[in-house]
Image (cartoon, rainbow, N blue to C red):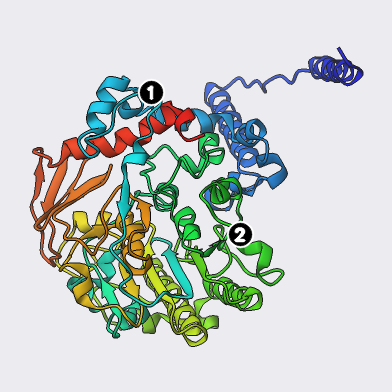
Amino acid sequence: MDFAGSGSLCLLGGLGSWLQSLPLFEMPRFDSAWAQYGINTVIFLFSIAIYYWFNFGGTFRHRFKPEWDEVPAEVKNDVFLGKATMDDLVALKIVWKHPVPEFMSKEDGAAAEDIRCVLPDFTGSSQDNPLMYCRRTAKGAKIRRPGHIFFILEESHCQGLYDAPYDMLNVVSHTKALRQEPGAFAISNFQPGGMISQTALGSILLGIYDCDVELNENKIIWDADLSKLPTTMAGQLRKLGYRTHFWYGGSLNWGSLVHFAPSAGFDRCYGGPDFCPPDSPQIWLGVYDHIYLDAVAEKIQAEADGSPEFHFIYTTSNHGPYNIPYESYGVHEQDAVTLPLGDLKPGDMDMRRFTGILYADKAIGDFVARMRKLYPDSLFVLTGDHASAVAPLGKGIIPRKDRLLREHILTSFSMHHPDLKPEFFAGNTMGEHQNILPTLMELIAPEGFEYYSLKPPLTEKISHVVTPYSWMDGSHIGFYKDDVWQQLAASAEDVPMEHGNMQYKDEWAAWQGITGWLLRHPEVIS
């Protein structure tokens, strides 16, 4: 044993002896049973309170507690120490609530059979990589090659805000205006790749479904060989000559992006606090959107050298607790919602949330306008990471009391370029995140260019959409977890919810099977 090890054991032994030598404190004793029970209860509750006060880093408010993502990068650079910083009780709760999913424990034979539902040539050999069967060939560019591609992933941005029942809200007025311009294409039935931020982001960047296993935190993915993980968005755009940039409004410690984004093929990765002005105001997720996007624009301009560039930009401000001083930045409650409207009242949390959505929408609109002025040939993709609550149902805004499945699941989507035409998109009225990369390829790649994608582009007719979470066809939408389905169309009235008889379950199992195969056989991507 070396000297350092011996010293550590001695130190720990000494601390243990000192703790054992501390005097014991007796509980106060009272003759009255009520008094004894009372003091016992007070001490018991105080013990719980002091535990949580220390556990939350000196506060009783969960929202203000230090986040695991705020652990210094030096700690998270070590895989063991990075995970060890998570509180044991929190880790146990996560394990209890998230057992190993069924698709991860399947035998190879059964998994291969699932995968062949969508990739019929997959052999099922333990050395076989299912992603190699996702090769496609571009038919030829449909638009002028954009010098800049901006993929803007908007936090908690949902389709419901654009649906007719919510036309009385002004919260997405800026992006609604963009959708009305020439060269815009939008889809009102669009599914995310995940139901929360990490899973949606991971699915988009890797081109495979995260399936709630948080691939962004997995060292197998960090160490993957991009040539054997050929579906990544940034990796494939690099092959087209684009320099790839990843921008996030918060720290790159969040979701281990400091490791994950480079492994997904990005040449350069930036966290908001590192390039925004010093002491920029932040919510707990990241720098205020308008400050962050202004800093992104300035850095893009400063570093531009004429090379084609792909910028993946992820925002953070459309998220609770909605305590940004919006009025200071020119966004007011009356701009978001014209009162009176149902039971909404000035200053309440619902009004703050609506104002926050408008603030984030305006920041996106201003950024797009600025980049268009600088780079008129730019291609923009605007989508949300996942859906969020649309409006406070039951407050008299609309008659319905419950959210529709479309409001629970669907995120937003639009594309913008001067050359885009409706006829490019085969009359499609539905899509999902995994359709975006192949669509980009069919719009800008030369004829014969080979790329990899689980799903087809939006330039081909899509009859239905299936993800590991939900399915959708021309008339209905279903959510696998709750085994329910419902009419797809937006409605201000209550819509019946059906149970059982879920569609496309073979395809649903196949997409999960691909992710499970890669994790059980990391050698095929390393």
* Residue 268: assigned label: 2
**On screen, residue 467 above or below 269:** above
Give the amino acid type for the residue marked by disc 1 in the picture: Ser
**On screen, residue 446 above or below 258:** below
107 or 454: which is nearer to us? 454
498 or 22: which is nearer to us? 498
Q: Is residue 112 left or right of residue 42?
A: left
Q: Of callouts 2 and 1, which one flags the residue occurring earlier in the amino acid sequence?
A: 1
**On screen, residue 155 above or below 75:** below
Let me know if residue 60 appears in the view: no
Q: Position of residue 97 (x, y in %)?
A: 39, 31
Q: In which quarter of the image is residue 160?
A: bottom left
Q: Is disc 2 surrounded by few (<14), some (14 to 19) or many (20+) residues within 10 Å?
A: few
Identified at 82% across, 19% down, the residue is 12
Q: Is residue 393 left or right of residue 76?
A: left
Could you say whether the residue bearing mark 2 is in a helix, strand or loop?
A: strand
Give the amino acid type for the residue marked by disc 2 in the picture: Arg
Kindly give the residue lying farthest to the top in the view shown: 1
Q: Position of residue 343 (x, y in %)?
A: 26, 72
92 or 147: which is nearer to us? 147
515 or 524: which is nearer to us? 524
Q: Mark 1 points at which residue?
A: 126
Q: Where is residue 414 in the image (x, y as percent from the top left)?
A: 31, 70
Identified at 53% across, 82% down, the residue is 329
Q: Is disc 1 surrounded by few (<14), some (14 to 19) or many (20+) residues within 10 Å?
A: some
Q: Is residue 517 left or right of residue 249?
A: left
Q: Which of marks 2 and 1 is in front?
A: 1
Kindly give the residue lying farthest to the front in the view shown: 448
Kindly give the residue lying farthest to the bottom in the view shown: 373
